[in-house]
Amino acid sequence: MRSLKLLLFLTPIFLLAFSSSAQEYDFFYFVQQWPRSFCNTNQGCCYPTYGKPPSDFGIHGLWPNYNNSSYPTYCDPNNTFDINEVQGLVFSLRAKWPSLKCPRSDSSRFWQLQWMKHGTCSVLSQSDYFSAALQLKAVTNILQCLQLAGIWPDDRRYTTLTSVVSAIQNCVGHTIYVQCNRDIRGRHQLYQVYICVNQTGTGLIDCPVFPTRTCPSSFRFPKF
Ligand code: 5GP
């Protein structure tokens, strides 16, 4: 009887502990940004201290998400970013996950922010989180997907939403989401591509849910 009472007392505490751990997210968004479209807006950009990033999509983040479109953030303030944990990955992170924010930096603040805001809500350790993102980048060559479909960054021509979405979906084998922003002259342009990934960060999946606003039916894909 005493142990039953104890169980009844402890169960809500357990449920509370698990519901606030936020590690029961449903999937990840793996988000990549087109550098030119981050730069040619009102906010402008600064290249990293180690040089201009490659003309390729760069990683923005790997974000735990719920099927109802909401998402957890800053799940464990004690699990602080430690650059030593990713020492072996820094060379690749600099190339594949550059920060374009001003003032110019070595990008580590961007990785730190992404880890604290999103990574701490995942089931992954810090080194597994950054390795998973780099691995996902290696298997999702969006620029190549677009180029194979005849879509190249071009300052004059507009491209269509249907051609961009189907080029990437046919190539990665799953549904994806594209996001546009506006350049300094107010013109719509391809900004980010969202690919969905299972909870462990190991495999691509069809997106269970899409953010609400996508691109207009035609937009620019500017040169970088
Ligand atoms: P989010 O909140 O979307 O996960 O991350 C965006 C934050 O990262 C913003 O505070 C932004 O200023 C910072 N940040 C640093 N470098 C970059 C970058 O290259 N691209 C984007 N989109 N955000 C960056």
Image (cartoon, grey):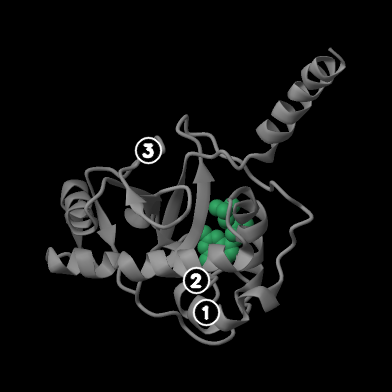
Which secondary structure, mark 1? helix
- Distance from disc 1 to disc 3, alpha carbons, whole Å, reads 29 Å
Judged from this view, the residue extending furthest toward the top is: 1
Callout 2 touching callout 1 (CB < 8 Å): yes
Q: Residue at x 51, y 58 (%)?
A: 61
Question: Disc 3 beta carbon < 8 A from ligand 1?
Answer: no
- Distance from disc 3 to disc 2, alpha carbons, whole Å, reads 23 Å
| Sequence-first tag of 1 and 3 | 1
Q: Which residue in the structure is indicated by mark 2?
A: 97
Kind of residue at disc 1: Arg
Q: Position of residue 180 (x, y in %)?
A: 36, 50
Looking at the image, residue 164 sits to the left or right of residue 208; the answer is: left
Question: Disc 2 beta carbon < 8 A from ligand 1?
Answer: no
Residue 94's label in the rendered image is 1
Q: Nearer the viewer, residue 195 or 190?
A: 195
Q: Position of residue 73 (x, y in %)?
A: 64, 45
Judged from this view, the residue extending furthest toward the right is: 2
Ligand 1 is found in which quarter of the picture? bottom right
Q: Quadrant of residue 90?
A: bottom right
Q: Which residue in the structure is indicated by mark 3?
A: 210
Note whether 89 is above or below 81 in the view shown: below
Q: Nearer the viewer, residue 180 or 44?
A: 180
Kind of residue at disc 3: Phe
Q: Quadrant of residue 201?
A: bottom left
